Image (spheres, rainbow, N blue to C red):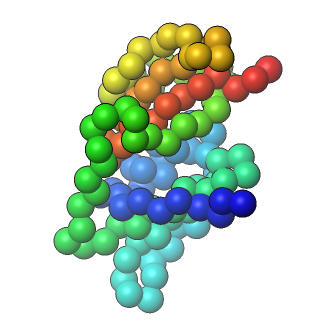
Amino acid sequence: MLKHVSFLARDLAATLAFYGRLGGVVEKDVTTPEGFRRGVVRLGGGRLQFFQMGGETPAPHEHWAEHVALHVPGLRALLPELRAAGVIVTRDLQSSPSGRDMAFVLDPDGRQVELLEAEG
């Protein structure tokens, strides 16, 4: 079973706030013994871990095929809120192959995030 996936973050606070807005729960925001900032966000049963490390820059791939996918409730209402907050939408609201609402946005580091309407 997957425990977590780790990524680099330019601005850990902005990244944690972004995923919190999508329903994530920040479990950790600490400084490691090496002096790096480390944050962990619980999203359902899984976790995303982020490190802000001086001199290291995130380099996510621009293509949507490399992405994080999240179930979110109320996507039709959430998407305009994200836009108003300056979040970049890369694939507008559309039907997923399963028929549920779906959209793609960029997180603060330019990582593609698929938002899929949670099952009711």
| Residue at the extreme left | 55
- Between residues 71 and 80, which one lies in front from this camera angle? 71
Q: 2 left or right of 10?
A: right
- For the image shown, how many numbered marks are present on the structure? 0
Residue 33 x, y percent position in the rendering: 44, 89
Quadrant of the drawing holding the C terminus: top right
- Between residues 53 and 115, which one lies in front from this camera angle? 115
Quadrant of the drawing holding the N terminus: bottom right
Identify the residue shown where x is 42% and y is 50%. Answer: 15
Q: 73 left or right of 102?
A: right
| Residue at the extreme bottom | 33
Identify the residue shown where x is 34% and y is 23%. Answer: 90
Identify the residue shown where x is 58% and y is 66%. Answer: 28
Identify the residue shown where x is 48% and y is 21%. Answer: 103
Residue 35 x, y percent position in the rendering: 36, 83
Q: Is residue 105 above or below residue 41?
A: above
Quadrant of the image occupied by residue 107: top left
Quadrant of the image occupied by residue 41: bottom right
- Can see residue 11? yes
Residue 113 x, y percent position in the rendering: 45, 36
- Between residues 5 and 17, which one lies in front from this camera angle? 5
Q: Is residue 65 above or below residue 30?
A: above
Residue 86 x, y percent position in the rendering: 33, 28
- Can see residue 84? no
Q: 78 left or right of 34?
A: right
Q: Is residue 100 above or below residue 3?
A: above
